[in-house]
Image (cartoon, coloured by chain):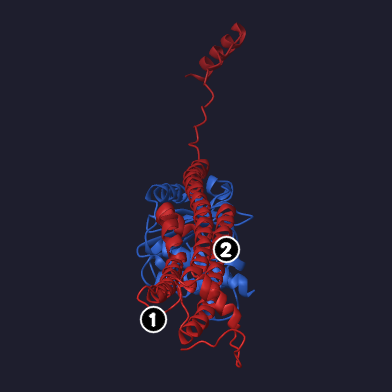
Chain colours: A blue, B red
Amino acid sequence: MTVKLTDLLGYQKQIEALFDTDSDLIVTNRDRDHAAVIVSTLFTRAKKSVILFCKNLDGDFYNRRPIRCAIVEAVKNGVNVEILVQEVPEANELLADLDSLSTRTNLRIGKCKPGISGAETEINFAVMDGKAFRLENDRNLHTALACAKNSELAEKLIQLFRVFCNDAQTIEPFILPQTGSGDNMDTSNIGVDGGLSTVGR
Amino acid sequence: MVYQPLGADPCPYIISATTLEIWRNEWAWLLPSPKADSLAGLSFISVTTGLNLALVKFELFRKSYKDIKEWLAEQHDDILGKKVRELIGFDDAAIEDYRNFVVAKLESIAGTCHDTQYKYGLRFRRWAISYLFIGLFALFTQWSLGFLGLALLIPVFSLWCIKTRATKKFSRDSHIYLEMAEDLKKQINAEQTAKAVQAATLIESAVPKPRTPRKPPAKTKRPVRRSASTAAKKRARTKAKGF
């Protein structure tokens, strides 16, 4: 366990070094722990925007405290956060946190309608500030390619995200799941609002 | 000091008087004597110079290996550059292997240097102390140190051998290490390109293909065939209705 933790801290240190130096090195991550390091780093380091395209906001992954905190902090700091999921999201705790930030206009969440290309594509990705990205190449193994600065590939990913989003037909509202832990767990609809929807009650 | 005649020494020295007498005869030219042609002074100088030389060589040797890790790390960084340094610690299998190799190699080289230094130092101290005692003994008994000066060449030569052997091994190890670094640099450059291509391909594969609109089936007006009798009936009906 200690070895693993040390390894993970070492990995995090290396990743942060990449972001500090705006390195264009494409690195890989081999498992969920490493993926968590990269995703949380993307949200922590974001200054303008983060887009996240994922399968279902996996609860085991996105409910982890570092990731939740990173996403919530990013929203609080005014970073434009856009999340598009392919299936019904599972990360109840994260969604509950985001629900408490429902007045923010810089948070938009949407879900692809079944049957369209966005819902069926195999790749998931996250892009930060139009330059850093994490592109998952195997959803089952959680292996991915990541880079702190590659505007070309990041731009392509953003375009792809817009393709999935811009077609209003591809976005459907979904209801924040109830966690039963408080008032802010009320079912909150995320309405269609020209592409991605702004979170709101 | 007045030497006792042979065989009449009531208090024998460590080296027997007989032996001393033999040495005195055989190596008379090296032995101290009140005469002006004595080489005692020269012998003493040679001993101290030899010891100093060995000491200086030892210090230099120790200094040269003191920063060995830093030197190797610098060489390594120069070859691989910033990118690969960043990569050490990431999880690609090749990088993992390389990281293990680097750690093992650095430890091995540092270990060898440490062993060599230790051996050198140990030998140097042993000889230095031995010769110091012998030298002091010779000095007190006013025996020539010329012997020791000559004899000291042996440890100096021996130390030189150790150092040369260690340097050769170090050079060989460093060469292998740096060669590996070169290979890795090439491999990583190739991998970076492959990764970029893979990412681009993945993105391309996810782009939805534009849907080609379905062509509506061509509307061909089917000519209504009416038999002559039907048309006549229709006309008759129209007339009957008054249109």
Q: B81 and A73: which one is in front? A: B81
Q: Kindly identify the residue that appears in the image at 45 percent across and 61 percent down.
A: B73
| Spot occupied by residue B168 in the image (x, y as percentages of width and height) | 51, 55
Q: A137 and A19: which one is in front? A: A19
Label 2 marks a residue whose chain is: B
Q: Residue furthest bottom?
A: B10
Q: Which residue is mark 1?
A: B34
Which mark, by number, is residue B108? Answer: 2
Q: Residue furthest top?
A: B228
Label 1 crowd (10 A; few <14 / some 14-19 / many >=20): few
Compared to residue B239, the image places residue A193 above or below, namely: below
Q: B155 and A32: which one is in front? A: B155
Compared to residue B9, the image places residue B218 above or below, namely: above
What is the quadrant of the N terminus of chain A in the image?
A: bottom right
| Spot occupied by residue B21 in the image (x, y as percentages of width and height) | 55, 78
Label 2 SS: helix
Q: Is residue B49 left or right of residue A138?
A: left
Q: Is residue A71 left or right of residue B13?
A: left
Can the viewer see residue A92 in this picture? yes
Can the viewer see residue A132 in this picture? no
| Spot occupied by residue A8 in the image (x, y as percentages of width and height) | 55, 68
Q: What is the three-letter code of the residue carrying label 1?
A: Pro
Label 1 SS: loop
Q: B30 and A198: which one is in front? A: B30
Q: Kindly identify the residue that appears in the image at 54 percent across and 88 percent down.
A: B4
Label 1 marks a residue whose chain is: B
Q: What is the three-letter code of the residue carrying label 2?
A: Ser
| Spot occupied by residue A108 in the image (x, y as percentages of width and height) | 44, 62
Quadrant of residue A5 within the rendered picture: bottom right
Q: CA distance from mark 1 to mark 2?
A: 57 Å
Compared to residue A86, the image places residue A4 above or below, namely: below
